[in-house]
Amino acid sequence: MLYFSKFKVLSIIFVCLFGLFFSLPNFLSNSQLNKLPSFFPSKQVNLGLDLRGGSHLLIEVESSVLVGERLDDLYNDLRSEFRSNNITIKNIDIIKDEIVIEVDNNTNISGLINIINELSQDVTSQFATIKTQEEIAVSNIEDNKFKLKLSDVAIESLRKRAVDQSIEILRRRIDELGTKEPTIQRQGKNRIIIQVPGLDDPNRLKELLGTTAKLTFHLMDPRSNIDNVSRSSIILYSRDNKDLPYIVEKRSIISGENLIDAQPGFDPQTNQPIVNFRFDSQGARKFGKVTSDNVGKPFAIVLDNEVISAPIINEPILGGSGMISGGFSVYEANDLAILLRSGALPAPLIILEERTVGPGLGADSVKAGQIASILGLFIVMIYMFISYGRFGIYSNISLIINLILILAILSTLQATLTLPGIAGIILTIGMAVDANVLIFERIREELANGKSVINSIDNGYKRALTTILDANITTFIAAIILFQLGSGPIKGFSVTLAIGIVTSVFTAFTLTRFIVARWIRKSNPKIINI
Amino acid sequence: MLKPVKFIKFDTHINFLSNAAIFVIISILLIILSLGTLFYKGLNFGIDFNGGTIIEVQKIIGNADVSEMRDRLSNLDIGNTQLQEFGKETDLLIRVEQNSDEEGSQQVVINKITEAIQSDYEVRRIEVVGPKVSGELVQKGITAVIASIMCVLLYIWFRFEWQFGIGAVVALMHDIIITIGMFSIFQLEFNLSIIAALLTIVGYSLNDTVVIYDRIREELRKYKKMPLTELINQALNLTLSRTLMTSITTLLALLSLYIFGGEVIKGFTFAMIWGVLIGTYSSIFIAAPVLIKLKVKRDWSKQERQEQ
């Protein structure tokens, strides 16, 4: 165990140099890093949100709403198709997530089935083996009742599309905030994880995420009054005054889908903050036609079922651009423009979990972690020195190299270092010496049994090896399971713990052993103090 | 030049097993106490498992005023809140119980609180866990602990004999139950990071147990005729110095983290310090005696031949 081939020696030196080289960026400031030549590694340890400050949000896309919306559409389509094809039915209704059609003897059943089949769109399954499938599943429970529901594949595809679109739109919205390196990931079937580091105002982020931003323009319905609303109209309330009702036509003239741009600005006359918008050519044509037909009448600008404003159409708006004024603050106008530019979310989003750390606490945690690690390291090193003398120093050299290796591996893998991760490193400091302790105790024992110095050291290493492996593999298993458990900060703990186990076994069996062997060969001591 | 200090006399002859019965009884009593309190008092679950909101705030100028803050919060109509000073006199931790099953309802609570305090407090941390996620985390936590025990049992079984596997798992269960019991008795907050600490305790306690078992196995091969009790005692004495050295270095490092590592991580570090203590105790006084009770196999000659 005391002989090292040239190759082994070179490998050990190489690994240590690798550690030094790749951990170096962590000890330099940014400006120093920029001055270094390009072949130099520049990756620093990637700090987790709990250390650099930022928001972690777990969001669920409420895709069930979409199923309801699709059923509503189908219901309306069915009714109008039945009417235009002269198919009489007894009743049609939506009960939970099913459309129930009651028929009687006069009903043309085959015609009814034809209409249903025509309305049912092909759904492409995400699994290649099932090619396409009907959207609507029809069951004929009793003789005179048909139940229609969306097929599982249809629901699945609605959900998938909603999540994909949401991710796309969220990305656009968050990019507008101008933050660095946001992560937006799908998780499971209908969840999205958002991680945004270094935010000054997490509430603004949540407002941007929580707004659907569905913009629609509606004509007002002058014939209805509040107690008697026609079936084609709906009561919406003002955004500024929740008690102020507007009766608007259900059908929108035009919606935000046709928007191509929205920018905050100021009304040249009143100097109030406004949002300027522009439609695409199709939208411009539609908008031009409706405004020409309705000059002198009011229309409502509706955002997420709230009326922002209800201006009167003074003249036809033909250029396809216009402005929304609604008593905004500069800040509100700015955010509304962002929301309109990035598009409406297909379904509402709900925040299931939030972990936000302010920049102040993050910086404090980094400082506390540094102090605790340096102090912990120092105390352990002193203790090892007192206990094992010269061998203690050797093991302390390994301990420092060990920490440098952990830093280097964290930097190159770009694994995230969290506050519990720092705890993992500190725990490793305590446990890393374990391998050396096992070996040194074994050497003491062999010496006490009257063996020669070289034999004792040789046996000490040999005998301790299996013990060290067994003991560390079991801890490693725990670390892997912890990694699987995986919420952010705790994952960070398991990562540093696992890396620490590997590096500490490595340093004990190569570096410390190498230093010990060199010393023995050089000075060939007859007695050793250990 | 360097004269090492031996904290533990090398040549110890402590009879650990003569008093084993006493320690086993103490441990059994502790386990009964733990399970009993767990049953009657339950655990003081944090928001990870119960759902809810915590907000850490820092007074911008001067010290925080708990009673004044309590008045402010009570006017907000946000349900049950708890308030405590958090590490420093300027810092407060606001805890709001989840008062609705509706996901996302807690965001309203946060808005109300931040609005009410933002003039003179800085929000340092917000954590919200909704009912769905907290339910999932409970499940994940339990699975993780059970999975780790199973994996470890398999590994030890594979590397040693089944008696060792059982002994290690008995010691592990002992550590986990008493640690959870302590959280129940003192009603300390039990959250996801405590589960992480539990798994680390599993790793650490096992580390200790494995080192001792390794030695017992070695002695079993060396001394085929020595009475089992004497043999295990000898193995315990031979590894004692190492057991204590490693425990002390780990404890020193953890203590440094406990004292200087900041308030956020205190619960986690505390659980681990406790775990190192109980893990060390159990590998000597529980894991080893179990082997005697299970009558571990004496004839290792066959395996020895295979290995050579």
Image: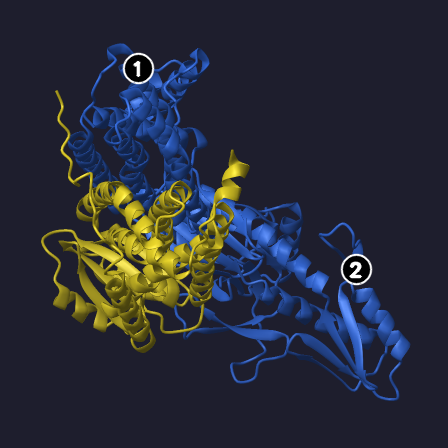
Chain colours: A blue, B yellow
> Observer-nearest residue: B31 or A196?
B31
Q: Which of marks 1 and 2 is nearer the N terminus?
A: 2
- Binning the other alpha carbons within 10 Å of mark 2 as few (below 14), some (14 to 19) or many (20 upward) gives some
Q: What residue sits 31% from the left and 42% below the top?
A: A51
Residue at numbered disc 1: A518
In the rendered view, tell whether residue A300 sits above or below residue A268.
below
Q: In which quarter of the image is residue A399?
A: top left
Q: In this view, does A424 lie above or below B134?
A: above
Q: Position of residue A226 (x, y in %)?
A: 51, 81
Residue nearest the viewer, comparing A65 with B254: B254
In the rendered structure, which amino acid carries the disc numbered 2?
A: Gln
Residue at 57%, 80% (x, y): give it.
Answer: A229
Which quarter of the figure is the N terminus of chain A placed in? top left
Q: Where is residue A214 in the image (x, y as percent from the top left)?
A: 54, 58
* Among the 4 quarters of the image, the one containing residue B23: bottom left
**Disc assigned to residue A133:** 2
Mark-to-mark CA distance, 1 and 2? 74 Å
In the visual, does A193 lie left or right of A494?
right
Residue B28 pos. (x, y %) = 30, 68
For the residue pair B3 and B70, the one nearer the viewer reads as B3
Chain letter for mark 1: A
- Split into 4 quadrants, where in the image is the C terminus of chain A? top left
Query: Does the CB distance between marks 1 and 2 fall below 8 Å?
Result: no
**Disc 2: which chain?**
A
Dot 1 amino acid type: Arg
